[in-house]
Image (cartoon, grey):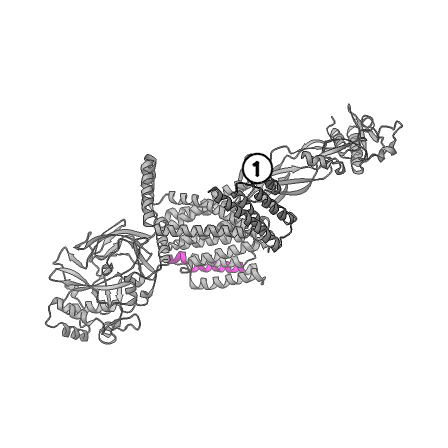
Amino acid sequence: MKTVIRVHRSGIVYICVSIVFGVISVNSGNNYHYLATAVMLGFMLASGIAGRGNIRSAEISIEYPDEVYAKTPFLLTVEVRNQSKRIPIYLIEVNVDGEKLMFPTVAAGETCRLRIYYSFPRRGINEIKDVRLFSVYPFNLFTRFWDVCGDLSSVVFPAPEKPAGETIYVPPEGGLGDDAARGLRADGDIIGVRPYISGDNMRQIHWKSSARTGKISSRVFDDDSSGGGKTIDLERLILSAGKERALSLAAYALKEAIISGEAIGMRGAGEEYPVSAAGGDKLAMLARLALHE
Amino acid sequence: MSSALISLKKLLIANSLLCALLSFAACRNIVSPAAAAIFLPALAASVFIDAFGWKRPPRYLLNLVSVIAVGSAMALVRIDSVIETFLSAVLLLTAVKMLEDKRARDHVQIVILSVITIVSAAALTFRPEFVMYYIVMSVLIAQGLLLSTLFSKAPEMVFNRKEALCLCRRALAIWLMMLPVCAALFFAAPRARAALTMPGYGAGDTTASGFVDRVTHGLIGRIQESNEIAFRAETPRVAANDLYWRGLTLSVFDGNEWRARQIRGPRHVDYAASGNHVRQEIFLEQGQFRVLFALDKPLTLDKIDFIYASDGVFLRSNRRMTRQLSYGAVSAVSAVMRPNDAAFDKEPYLSLPPGFSPPLRDLTDGLTQGLDERSKISAIQGYLSPPAFSYSLDNLPVSDNALEEFVLDIKKGNCEYFASAMAVMCRMAGIPSRLVAGYRGGYYNVSGEYYIVRQKNAHAWVELWDSAEKAWRRRDPTPPDESVEISLRQRETGRFAMYLDLLSLRVSQLIVEYGGDEQMELIERFKGFLLNPGASFQSAAGNMKDTLRRRALPIFAVMIVLIAVLLAMRAGRFSKRSPEAALLRDFLSATSRRGFTKRPDEGLEEFANTIPETDARELRELAWRFVVAFEQDYYRDRPMTAAKLSELKEIVQQIKRASKNSSNDLL
């Protein structure tokens, strides 16, 4: 992580004043002038050390929401964590693709979050390329900055598109029909517990198990994979609507299912996702759509 | 508990105000009275505007005032007062800035203007208190720049007291980080052998001097009341009767004024003196005279470029002072000065204006008729003695016949009148005489082993030619004055003031007088350390031992003060704790004394369980009683009642008593 320093106009003035003081000192031989020059230069160095310490204590992370759809603005969370346990940090500015976020102060050991609207133009794995950390602390003479490294990518789901009469789902084959499937919720008998998957409903969380193990766990219901509910027929959809539109239509269906809590499955592209009401499964299907070749 | 919020803006305004006040304090004696008269009301107005929301003057008006201030400064500037005029203009600009609706950059500008003011004022003075101005100013710089940076980015920021203090501590931390760098740069920066100076450089802010290069009757009486320091002299203690600091010898009398003779002096001292040789290190305060003082009779000076101007007078070569002046001197402490050429021309020392004061001549003739030389001197001095004559600084005769008026009528005066009268009367009696202007007495600072000589110690005495010994002999006809006597008895200043003065002297030696020679010495020492670290350590240890021995009392006092401050801080921290937290601390400390220490990750109940039932049944029961009662309130965020607190305290006391008993059992 390489910190770059840029001198401000005020910094240039400060340096010039220091040089003038230096010249006066040497010419006059007056120790008070030497002292003034030493104070000015000393502050320059001390501000560098303090500024470096300040910016080094800041840890930046970017948080995406669970569902990120292409061409759809979402709230991007920028988080600044103060790694120091004793000293607050000041004036941290984060530049996200030209959008500036100011964190005036972050208390010792605390985390501050700010959110901005952001959107990706395409589905697939997308990355915010320009995330930069700035700080003018402590004296506004110089700006220190570095480009935030690390994994800033997110899987961006296809832009959801409402169907205009296209057939999305596999036709019902008798037995448990659409109506019955619609009634299925995550409230059947518990058949097991599995680790929490992002997107799982809060009601699905098994609190006792989570407390015991220290890791959040979700309940698995006997109707999670019952095969009921609707199943998206991706292959047929691609044939009828074209690839990108088909992916967008499927994404729309899955998004709606997440909102309503209905069970849904998907088949096509060589994979089959059984019908499930679990949010995590729906997100997995959306991710599959996002990464569709 | 809620606490009042402090806005960043207010903090910044307070800082800027302090900067402005400090800069004014530094240049108050230098700037024009008009600038001072405008600055202070303007500053007061800015306080009211910022604090009570009074209507602010329009910006165009303030800009106009700024232009006028700078314009007037440029129009009024004189070659010998460039810095004074510049300072007045900068001070007015600071006042204008304070009146403005201040943005972040305005606050920065106020800080810069204040720094420029202090640095410019430092060009005119070498007083050690400027070090204090620099220290305070540098703290304000750190604070001002930090706050204005925050203000530029988040102007609406507010803090509670704790956050504001935290911010101040950050500024202080930056200041502390700056200190070692500053010290290194200050001592390492190259010193020019021959510094350039500009007009007026080092000439301002001089202390009103009790010493004069010519004695005019009645002129310096008021100055003799001044408590300003004239110089300090590091030297072993000298007998009070010998404490005469020689300055200038005045041989020419024109009827009203004594002045020095214009003679081309020899290159080396042209006399001998037989007293003890005493070495002195003189630290001269800034003054307008070139005279270099030393104990009467100075034999040689060193560490300074000087000119010997005959009659025991030394002058510095440089007309302008670019830094505080210090020099070494060796004197023979004696009342007698024997010229190498005893056959020198005595005529100038007998000269009086033609027809000068017949009544005085008649008086002298009457006093000295038929007496030998020594008896004449005794008769004249006896005449000028109490009770007929007395010392006074009030109602001094100042007419054209001041001396005659003093001797024949008023009979009260200060040292100049007595010395002048004696010298004139001796000349009338045919005894060569001259006046010596300098200082008498001084307060001996035992800790620093140096004399502090103040302006009020300014003195004049006479030297009379002793034809038998062929030497000049000192005579002091001035009767004792209480203020002078107090100074001689060396009980003038309190102990604390003495330490402060010592600190001021050391600061002056370390910073103000640091120059090329000291730098070379420092480099040599560093080289010595690199070449032979062992010897350097030994020498440093020896010095430290010596310092500890000599300065045991002040070091002990400083340590006591530090310990008191630390204890007060600790007490303050504990007093801020809730009674519940204090109780818990007591409980854990009492159990720890019994050998059961709670781990940080252990709950209270868990801890109580660790006390074994078999070995410490009583302690375990007491601990459980405490824990159960404590948890009932503490973990419900409920303040404990007084009854509950006293119950818990009683349990802790029981644990402590049990602890004592068990210790006794063990013994």
From the image, tell me which residue sits under label 1.
Answer: A146
Q: Main secondary structure of the magenta part?
A: helix
Q: How crowded is mark 1: few (under 14 residues within 10 Å), some or many (20 or more)?
A: some
Between B560 and B189, the one lying in front of the other is B560
Quadrant placement of the C terminus of chain A:
top right
**Range drawn in magenta:** B62-84
Task: Give the quadrant of the N terminus of chain A.
Answer: top right
Queried whether the magenta region covers residue B434, the answer comes back as no
Q: Which residue is drawn at 59% across and 55% down?
A: B5
- Of all residues, the one furthest to the front in this rendering is B665
Q: In which quarter of the image is residue B118?
A: bottom left
Q: Give me the chain letter of mark 1.
A: A
B550 horizontally vs B185: left or right = left
Res. A158 visible in picture: no
Query: SS of the residue at dot 1?
Result: strand
- Is B29 situated left or right of A74 in this image? left
Rendering coords of residue B599 (x, y %): 56, 39
Is B64 contained in the magenta span?
Answer: yes
Extreme residue in the top direction: A270
At label 1, which amino acid type do we have?
Answer: Trp
- Residue positioned 89% across, 28% down in the render: A175
Residue B322 position in % (x across, y down): 34, 51
Q: Position of residue B389 (x, y in %)?
A: 23, 72
Q: In this view, does B564 lie to the left or right of A273?
A: left
Quarter location, residue A188:
top right
